[in-house]
Image (spheres, helix red, strand yellow):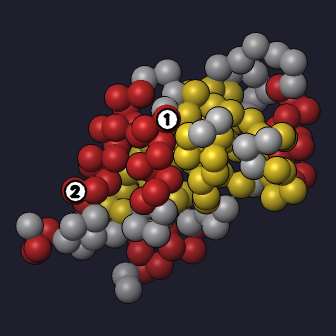
Amino acid sequence: MSDELKKLTEQAHDGITTFDFDGKETPCIIIEEKKYDDMLAKVAGQSLSINTDLNILQDGLGNVFVEVVLTFSKGNIVEKFMINAKTHLDFFVTLSKTSMFALSSPKSNYGKDNVFMIQLPRPEKAQDALEIIKNALIPKNQK
């Protein structure tokens, strides 16, 4: 394993899942409870937008990582999550279908309470990202 791949693997966020939200499978990023509570305290009750960037990193050997960068318009919050697309492809498949995802703490009841939903303003970006990810997951020498 290359040093860069090892570094990305170590940076990959563990709290990646999906859950049923109003009958739709929805992607979710689980973050440490204190961080989640602090974030909500800064933005609670405010109208805000969240710029969501999906930065795709690939090595041409079938390893793909996506850095999800969330920039909140209020509260001076920027959060980054590195997701291993090889092990969490379902996150991106459901994201391309729902165009939304949740942030949650480990103590939340997914799909019921204490989840922070983020709607992507441009659904085609998630669909485009999924296609790039799927293509990148196939090693170049096997195409």
Q: Position of residue 100 (x, y in %)?
A: 55, 34
Question: Could you say which is closer to the camera, residue 44 or residue 102?
Answer: 102
Tell me if 130 is positioned left or right of 27 in this view.
left
Give the answer, above or below, for where 105 lies relative to 38. below
Q: Is residue 128 among the parts visible in the rendering?
A: yes
**Which residue is under mark 1?**
98
Q: Residues within 10 Å of mark 1 (few under 14, many from 20)?
A: some
Residue position marked by numbered label 2 in the rendering: 135
Residue at 32% over, 54% down? 133
The percent position of residue 75, horizontal first and vertical second, equals 80, 27
Q: Amino acid at mark 2?
A: Asn
Mark-to-mark CA distance, 2 and 1? 21 Å
x 42%, y 59%: residue: 89
Which tag is nearer the camera, tag 2 or tag 1? 1
Q: Which residue is farthest front?
A: 23
Residue that extends furthest to the top in the rendered view of this protein: 47
